[in-house]
Image (spheres, rainbow, N blue to C red):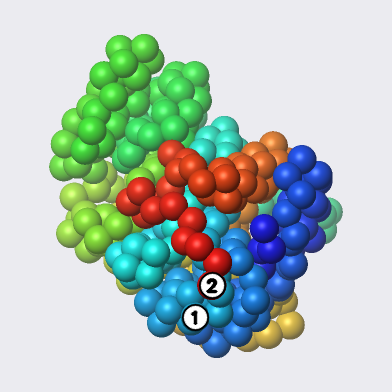
Amino acid sequence: MRIAVFDTHSYDRHSFDEANQAFGHDLKYFESRLSLETVALARGFEGVCVFVNDQLNRPTLEALKAGGVRLVALRCAGFNNVDVAAAEELDLPVVRVPAYSPYAVAEHTVALLMALNRKIYRAYARVREGNFSLSGLVGFDVHGKTVGVIGTGKIGQVFARIMKGFGCEVLAYDKFPNQDLADEIGLRYVSLDELYERCDILSLHVPLADDSLHMIDKAAVARMKRGVILLNTSRGGLIETAALIEGLKTGKIGGAGLDVYEHEAGVFFEDFSNRVIQDDELARLLTFPNVVITGHQAFLTDTALHNIAETTLGNISTIEAGEIPPTCVTRTLALPPRT
């Protein structure tokens, strides 16, 4: 199948070219993100492959359909950037990669926690300049702390296990509690209120949906334990940025480790080192000494990139063969005929 692959970088092209040796699809790479402004690039392709910041709203999907596209393949787990109802109406199957490496994201979450807690970023910068002073670098023992895990899917489970290995008390919240996990590692499911009140560290591992948008808002921050460390490697929209900034200013939030940001599209994955960042809230967050931000790189391991490419191309081949893979986001839609 001829596929237009949007929002690509060198690491995407390498992993897809390597995996595609087993599938034989015709891949054309574009650095541009897919949107209504760039959708003309997809004309003449049978499918498009997209990432987290490509925008597949109804007008874009309609333009894709009119241009001959028959399939949308997400190379990510989340699909909040796709109008699924519109895709179904247009008979456009949408497939995703529900699990590529939960270890990659969970381990990056721990890296953010430890870098933030032990001031690794500040210590590194000092030592590079010959400053070996320890003033201002005091952290805390993670061992013995109470950690809250919001969302115990594949990534949340791995993170919970790692924190249990650190010797933490692990509390969790999930709409669908996993009792097997609770019994296995000794975590306890509690209400969000109890989680906020008791936890020294909070980590978000839920998808972005209507009911989770801004789940960390002003009211949620007010219920949290003073000095809490907040971690987010899931989706930026889970946190209301204004509430986060206010919590950091008042000391209610003792630190934040973020790999995602609610307005990251147009900034993350790009080089702004010689440009002025126009987003005032992001610029404000970057001024806090107790905030560590990475640019949506939690997934970025060789294992994850290989799994993403292999699963994405496998999804395309399965759909092309007339079957519906379990990774299909749209309801039982087979590949529409060529026009």
Above or below, comparing residue 146 to residue 252 in the picture: above
Q: Compare residues 45 and 29 and report the one nearer the observer.
A: 45
Q: Is residue 25 left or right of residue 279?
A: right
Q: Residues within 10 Å of mark 1 (few under 14, many from 20)?
A: some
Q: Secondary structure at mark 2?
A: loop
- Amino acid type at circle 2 is Thr
Residue at the spot x=61%, y=66% of the render?
A: 46
Q: Quadrant of the C terminus?
A: bottom right
> Which numbered disc flags the more N-terminal residue, 2 or 1?
1
On the image, the x and y values in percent for residue 33 come to 60, 74
From the image, tell me which residue sits under label 1: 66
Q: Residues within 10 Å of mark 2 (few under 14, many from 20)?
A: few
Asked if labels 1 and 2 touch by Cβ distance under 8 angstroms, the answer is no
Residue 209 figure quarter: bottom left
On the image, the x and y values in percent for residue 20 come to 76, 47
- Amino acid type at circle 1 is Ala
Above or below, comparing residue 122 to residue 324 in the picture: below
- Residue 163 in view, yes or no: no
From the image, tell me which residue sits under label 2: 339
Above or below, comparing residue 253 to residue 82 in the picture: above
Q: Compare residues 113 and 144 and report the one nearer the observer.
A: 113
Outermost residue toward the top in this view = 184
Residue at the spot x=23%, y=43% of the render?
A: 196
Above or below, comparing residue 235 to residue 313 in the picture: below
Cα–Cα span, label 2 and label 1: 10 Å
How many marks the image carries: the answer is 2
Residue at the spot x=34%, y=63% of the render?
A: 88
On the image, the x and y values in percent for residue 158 come to 48, 28
Q: Secondary structure at mark 1?
A: helix
Q: Compare residues 250 and 224 and report the one nearer the observer.
A: 224
